[in-house]
Image (spheres, helix red, strand yellow):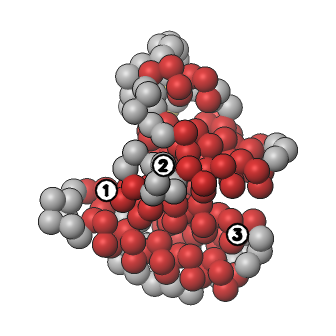
Amino acid sequence: MPHLAHQDRTLQATGPQWYVTPGSWITAFYLAVICREKDRITALCHVPLSLLRENDSRFDAYHYDWIDTLQTYWLGGPDLVQKLVAAVDGTDPQTASDPETAGKLMYPPMEMFHRFVRKDHAGFTQALTTALQWHKEYWTEESRMYQAPGLVALAPLAMACIAHDAGIPIEVESEYLPATLLGRNWCGEFPT
């Protein structure tokens, strides 16, 4: 039950809506991970992929594969590696509908996650460094440089939070990777 305006409120389910898309699911997942909201992450991981497919055909198959990978990881389901491979393969510039976004924003957290799953700390650090470079390159392009999503590297930050919480030291520092969020300094201070 959500807590709004200092009261617990009951909200009616609305069914499929225009904003229920793979993109909004992925963003919500990253934010929940960064905020360490385990119940929200679990709730998101119970959202059926079929619901996300109902409203929007603008998304490539790799979006659904990536969501499936994250849900499988969080819920401890089978075939994690195969799902991750499918997601990574989908970001291939030859098949992605937007190769730049796929290559610079979607693939990097997949590579970081791959290194995390393999417990490859050095590889994770290199993947994080590369992800931050691509994030900067993508968001400093003239037509995008004043857009809010470029201020924080949300996907790399979320993957770094998962790794940090699993005991992998995060030695990379960047203006795109707020240390306060990474280090859990504000967890639990604000109602969410």
Say whether disc 3 or disc 2 marks the residue closer to the N-terminus.
Answer: 2
Residue type marked 3: Phe
From the viewer's side, name the closer residue of 105 and 88.
88
| Residue 8 location (% of width, % of height) | 52, 26
Q: Mark 2 near mark 1, Cβ–Cβ under 8 Å?
A: no
Residue type marked 2: Thr
Q: Measure the alpha-carbon separation of dots 3 and 2.
A: 26 Å
Say whether disc 2 or disc 1 marks the residue closer to the N-terminus.
Answer: 2
Q: Residue at x 31, y 72 (%)?
A: 137
Q: Please give the label number shown on residue 149.
A: 1
| Residue 118 location (% of width, % of height) | 77, 71
Q: Mark 1 near mark 3, Cβ–Cβ under 8 Å?
A: no
Splitting the image into 4 quarters, where does residue 41 fall?
top right
From the viewer's side, name the closer residue of 65 and 135.
65
Q: Measure the alpha-carbon separation of dots 1 and 3.
A: 24 Å
Residue denoted by label 2: 95
Q: Please give the label number shown on residue 116.
A: 3
Q: Residue at x 60, y 68 (%)?
A: 112
| Residue 85 location (% of width, % of height) | 69, 55
Residue type marked 1: Pro
Q: Residue at x 43, y 74 (%)?
A: 132
Rendered position, 173 above or below 143: below
Give the left or right position of residue 107, taking residue 113 as reference: left
From the viewer's side, name the closer residue of 28 and 6.
28
Q: Is residue 4 visible?
A: no
Rendered position, 10 above or below 117: above
Q: Secondary structure at mark 3?
A: helix
